[in-house]
Amino acid sequence: MQIPKIIQGGMGISISDWYLAKTVSMTGQLGVISGTGLHITLIARLMDGDREGNVRRALDNFPFQEPVKKILDKYFVPYSGKRKTGYKRPQMWGIKPTNSINELTVIANFVEVFLAKENHKNAVGINFLEKIQLPTLASIYGAMLAGVNYIFMGAGIPMQIPAIIEKLSNHEDVNYKLDVTGSSKEDDFRINFEPGKIFPEIGEKIGNLCKPYFVPIISSVVLAKALLKRASGKIDGFVIENSTAGGHNAPPRSVSAEGKAVYGAKDEVDLQQIKEIGLPFWLAGDYYSHEKFLAAIEQGAAGVQVGTAFAFCKESGMDPEIRKSIIEKIKKDSIEIVTDFKASPTGFPFKVVQHSGSVTDKDVYNERCRICDIGLLRQAYKKEDGEVGFRCSAEPEDAFISKGGKAEELEGTVCLCNNLFATAGMPQIRKDGYTEPPVVTSGDALNSIKNNFLKGCNEYSASDVIDLILGKKTKSL
């Protein structure tokens, strides 16, 4: 197993895009793509004109060109200036996906990994969320077709993934047992994925695929041991993420009277027990300095995973204007990060940067009409007729409640799907001209950027982050 010292976090949607991952991997560390919503990203890039031709070049390398032609015919729009209309939305994922949504998702993941690996031989990883289950099989297969080297998965307990990777390496049919609210022990709701049905020539055209290493992202010793005991196959290591990391966090053991997260000693991971497991592990959450990197190594870690510092470097996929605006606030020591229990429809705490113009601005939040047209974070539930339905606490109130949702679950939720795409520079424009606002997530290390990376400048590079963590003299500052 290749052991990187630094893993660049898989931040999504499209913050950790192919370009950032490639930049990091070419330094010899591990660049990681966010695998969340890549089928929507692919459509957006094609409808924005694919000005440099990167997407179409990757599509030319996909082994089956008939579905590629369908995608181009439907979504590619030659660049003609600033976009004034909305992106086309594909059908939402369901428990019985059509060939077209499977094709689109496989190809989108292939494209992102292909571009990240293009013109170098170093390893590249991809990060998925266990909470987003419906596209997982097609996404993993697409990434494997492009030769992804590592698969990371957090926000849940990914017991089923190792066996899925094994089978997909041989192009075998696979299925994924879904988490369905209201289901009983007797229920067995699964989504199926059949490579040979989606791509009939697969057996003739492509041999067995290389199996990527599988590294779950966890926050407890109990979960590490449970995965080793009950997972469907081999676990190759762990990322141990603490409560200071950005994005979704594990729920804390206690909450203050004001309803705020209180992370304490009970939430800390016993690294000695992790070390005794004998697998490589990386520490994540505030490991942004050379001193903290050395401390991690001293505790037995193979290295560190770093997200926030890369999220705000000049190579990240964040909209440049949003990145520059937040960096200005960092330089003025006026940035605030809140662990929000209500923002994410997943129910997991979610770290949110308080930023004007984003949905953390009360006026911006109240102006937005609720709509769910991407649906990655919808919750599966068992309907009265025994079938599976889907609801999202960020969708229109009447629709959510009619599906059995509770009114109190609606308060404060944001549409992370649409808002995070806006943060990556791909905001949806509605028919009435309304443009979806962003939401910015970050770890607690955001304030450290000023003294560690900016040092009086207005931007910094991914190489600067790597050099500082490894204790090398930075080149661009």
Image: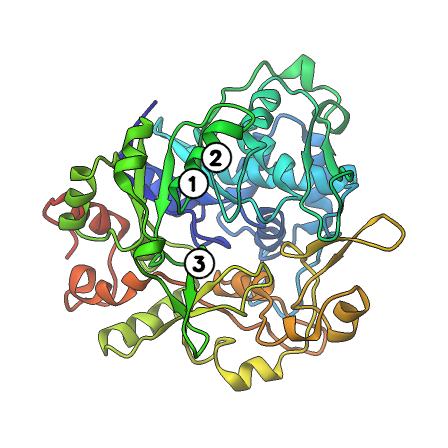
Q: Residues within 10 Å of mark 2 (few under 14, many from 20)?
A: few
Visible residue check, residue 26: no
Amino acid type of the residue tagged 1 in the rendering: Val
Mark on residue 222? 1
The answer to whether 166 is drawn above or below residue 44 in the figure is above
Is the C-beta separation of discs 2 and 1 under 8 Å?
A: yes
Is the C-beta separation of discs 2 and 3 under 8 Å?
A: no
User: The residue tagged with tag 2: helix, strand or loop?
Assistant: helix
Amino acid type of the residue tagged 3 in the rendering: Gly
Q: Residue furthest right?
A: 385
Which part of the image, by quadrant, shows the N terminus? top left
Tell me how the rendering is colored: rainbow
Q: Residue 325's x, y, as percent?
A: 35, 74
Q: According to the image, label 2 marks what residue?
A: 226
Mark on residue 247? 3
Residue at x-position 75% and y-position 47%: 183
Residue at x-position 49% and y-position 28%: 229
Q: Residues within 10 Å of mark 3 (few under 14, many from 20)?
A: many
The answer to whether 106 is drawn above or below residue 257 in the figure is above
Measured Cα–Cα span from mark 1 to mark 3: 22 Å
> Which sits earlier in the primary sequence, circle 1 or circle 3?
1
User: The residue tagged with tag 1: helix, strand or loop?
Assistant: helix
Amino acid type of the residue tagged 2 in the rendering: Ala
Residue at x-position 42% and y-position 36%: 224
Q: Residue furthest bottom?
A: 363
Q: Residue 252's x, y, as percent?
A: 42, 60
Left/right placement of residue 293 relative to residue 22 reads left
Q: Nearer the viewer, mark 1 or mark 3?
A: 1
Q: Residue 212's x, y, as percent?
A: 47, 26
